[in-house]
Image: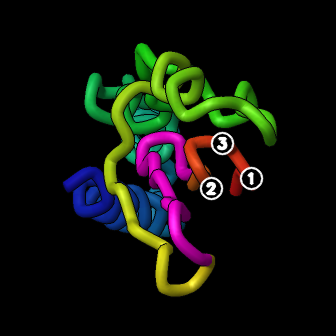
Amino acid sequence: MTTILFGVVLLQWIVVVAISLFKRIPKSLIASSLILAAGYVNAFGVRRDSTALKAAALPQHSAMGSCALIEPGMSAEAVRTRLGKPSDVRDDGKIRGPGAVTWVYRDSRCAIHLLDEKVELVE
């Protein structure tokens, strides 16, 4: 919408400039230039940020901790205390052997690899 408004204002300014070439009407040219400037500021100038835009720009803060708090060797209970319940629990018994589990935390974008209730790797 603002681009269309700017286009109309620009077209109006071009018409006034074309008329001013044949007739010397400085007041009309000055007024038209001010209208063009106002249209330009409206179309491309500083805009008020909407609440949705501000919310999208801000990082999501969860009440839980970060995967940076987790170190190899920690117990599964300590991980659950610091990060809370995982988004997904994957049984890795077939790949890594019995007792192997991966806890996926989607909000933190990390995965905790456990073996026998102890942290092996944090991704």
The residues bearing labels 2 and 3 have C-alpha atoms spaced at a distance of: 5 Å
The span shown in magenta is 97-110
Residue 26: x and y in percent read 51, 39
| Quarter of the image where one finds residue 3 | bottom left
Note whether 22 is above or below 36 in the view shown.
below
* Residue type (three-letter) at the residue carrying disc 1: Glu
The residues bearing labels 1 and 3 have C-alpha atoms spaced at a distance of: 6 Å
Residue for point 41% across, 34% down: 38
Q: Quadrant for the N terminus, please.
A: bottom left
- Residue marked by disc 1: 120
Give SS at disc 3.
Answer: strand
Residue 79: x and y in percent read 56, 29
* Residue type (three-letter) at the residue carrying disc 3: Lys
Label tally:
3
Question: Disc 2 vs disc 1: Cβ atoms closer than 8 Å?
Answer: yes
Q: Residue 115 carries which label?
A: 2
Q: Residue 118 carries which label?
A: 3
